[in-house]
Amino acid sequence: MPLFWLFPALILIEIAAFVMIGSEIGVGLTLLLVLGSTALGVWTLRRLGLQAAQAMQSGFAFAARGGRENPVQQMGDGTLKAFASGLLIVPGLVSSALGAVLLIPAVRQFLWQRLQSRLNIRTASYGAAHGRNEGVIDGEFTEVDTRAPQVGGAANENSVWRQHPQDDQK
């Protein structure tokens, strides 16, 4: 039930912040500040997407070489960056301030250390990550009878696609 009151309280806090800051610096600058924070949020979210793709690519390459690094810290950092970008995109001064604070790496690291102790995080690794199955290449194969006539890819004697010798003479 306490979470029910959280959303209306945040809205009232945002309205109060608009009124207080708007009376100090003016309506135009307040709106410019909100639009600027939204633009910053969109920019960081776009940059975050590119960084996440590059980190995933390098993580896969590292794992393919037999690396044993745990990606949980990187995932937590990326999640907090995405949350910070979301807070910046949402129109509001308090949410934008919280998003800007979350963009600071030391704050993200501190917060992730606190959150990690409360989360149940499980990781899994397979095969080469533990140094086992070295030299084993996983794959599939299909036996092909090279003596069977193949027309249209069918090599089955009972196939309706099988070419009959009398068809060639017509």
Image: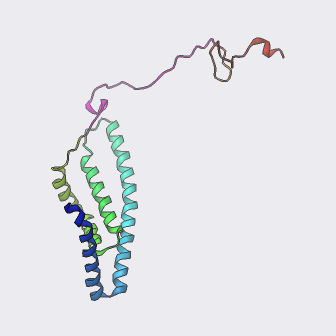
Quarter assignment of residue 151: top right
Residue 150 rendering spot, x and y as whole percentages: 66, 18
Residue 41 rendering spot, x and y as whole percentages: 36, 67
Identify the colour scheme used. rainbow
Image point (19%, 58%), residue name? 111
User: Quick check: 40 above or below 166?
Assistant: below
Residue 75 vs residue 117, the one in the foreground? 117
Residue 127 vs residue 116, the one in the foreground? 116
Image point (64%, 23%), residue name? 153
What secondary structure is the stretch in magenta mostly built from? loop
The part of the chain drawn in magenta is: 123-148
**170 left or right, relative to 156:** right
125 magenta-colored: yes
Image point (46%, 24%), residue name? 140
Residue 59 vs residue 14, the one in the foreground? 14
Residue 92 rendering spot, x and y as whole percentages: 31, 73
Image point (23%, 71%), residue name? 9
Figure label count: 0
User: Quick check: 53 above or below 45?
Assistant: above
Which quarter shows the C terminus? top right
Quarter assignment of residue 132: top left
User: Quick check: 135 above or below 125?
Assistant: above
Quarter assignment of residue 36: bottom left
**Residue at the extreme right:** 170
Which quarter shows the N terminus? bottom left
78 magenta-colored: no
**165 left or right, relative to 98:** right
Residue 130 rendering spot, x and y as whole percentages: 26, 31
